Image (tube, rainbow, N blue to C red):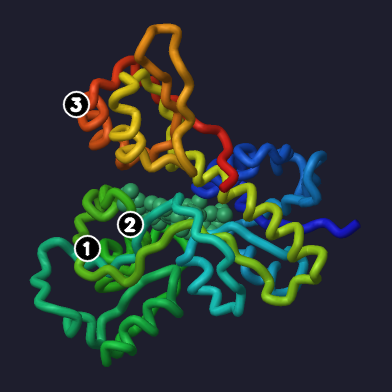
Amino acid sequence: MERLKIAIQKSGRLTEDSQNLFNECSIEIQDGKRQLLAPSPNFPIDLLYLRDDDIPQYIEDAVADVGILGENVWLESQTQLRIVKRLGFSKCRLCLAIPRGEKYEGIDYFRGKRIATTYPNIVKKFLLDRGIEAEIHEISGSVEIAPNIGLADAICDIVSTGSTLMSNGLKEVETVMRSEALMVANPNLSPEKEAILQKLLFRIEAVEAAKRNKYILLNVPNTEIEAICNILPGMKSPTVLPLAKEGWSSLHSVVNEEKFWELIDNLKAHGAEGILVVPIEKMIL
Ligand code: PRT
Ligand code: ZN
């Protein structure tokens, strides 16, 4: 039987969240400390632990089938991998930054400037689209020190809190792109591998749906059941069970976490009592 090879980052900002994704789907995985290729004992996938920058090429060469990586690395790689899922973690942005004391009046600032970056393809395209020619210097690490050592006039780097820029006397002046972790795949998977991928996505989506929702239980006067059922957008319709206490029922339903707080006041106004809100582990719609 075929197995799906999934490349994830060996050790870095994406690693823990990538591994959690499998754990939450009840897929047992082994970590990549001792081995490059780690088969799951209970799901037909093998994890391949790599440096994030190597993931696009491995998938393009069909050594791996699927990968989890930052959108920035995916875009920079200029490979034809399809995005199968936006994963929502490792959010950051790629920014152009210049020394704090410089006056900035717009993108024209970068005309003819030397820009240090790890993302030359993305930066070149960003500037070219805006009619700006600049000198792009590709460097692999510690981009933020380039202006201070006279290697560049500006940088283009990943920013999350902004404290790295701040402590290097730089300020952010343009957002080149926003990024989050993506699951990408080779566009030509065999039907067997595609089926495994769909099974995995089904599980991931069930976990995501569960996270967005809460199971809610509340006691309500029978006279208010109808009004309360109209407030609660249950999966189909809420479950209503009679309570031992005359004239009262217990109502069970699923509510969206974001809407939850607005609903609570409304439910109380209709006489609801003993409201319990419980997390849901998996949710299949
Ligand atoms: O060894 P390997 O090549 O696998 O790892 P790496 O060092 O290239 O990547 P890693 O683990 O640092 O980041 C992996 C991915 O996480 C990146 O490709 C981004 O998609 C995402 N990500 C999210 C970040 C950050 N946040 C981040 N803050 N990647 C890097 N940074 C760095 C940034 O380069 C800068 O040095 O953190 C610094 C800025 O952070 P703030 O908080 O000071 O603004
Ligand atoms: Zn890297």
Give the residue at the far bottom of this rendering.
131
Q: Secondary structure at mark 1?
A: strand
Q: Residues within 10 Å of mark 1 (few under 14, many from 20)?
A: many
Instruction: Tell me residue 285's x, y (percent).
Output: 56, 48
Instruction: Tell me residue 146's x, y (percent).
Output: 33, 65
Mark 2 CB in 8 Å range of ligand 1?
yes
Is residue 150 visible from the viewing direction of this image? Answer: no
| Location of mark 3 (residue) | 269
Mark 1 CB in 8 Å range of ligand 1?
no
The vertical placement of 186 against 93, above or below, is: below
Instruction: Tell me residue 218's x, y (percent).
Output: 37, 21
- Quadrant for the N terminus, please: bottom right
| Location of mark 2 (residue) | 159
Marks 1/3 in contact by CB < 8 Å: the verdict is no
Q: Nearer the viewer, residue 23 or 199?
A: 199
What amino acid is found at the position of numbered circle 1 in the picture? Glu
| Location of mark 1 (residue) | 172
Compute the Cα span from label 1 to label 3. 49 Å
Q: Residue at x 58, y 38 (%)?
A: 282
Give residue 266's quadrant in the image.
top left
Give the residue at the far top of this rendering.
245
Q: Nearer the viewer, residue 164 or 194?
A: 194
Q: Residue at x 33, y 57 (%)?
A: 159
- Left or right position of 76 against 98: right
- Left or right position of 109 against 205: left
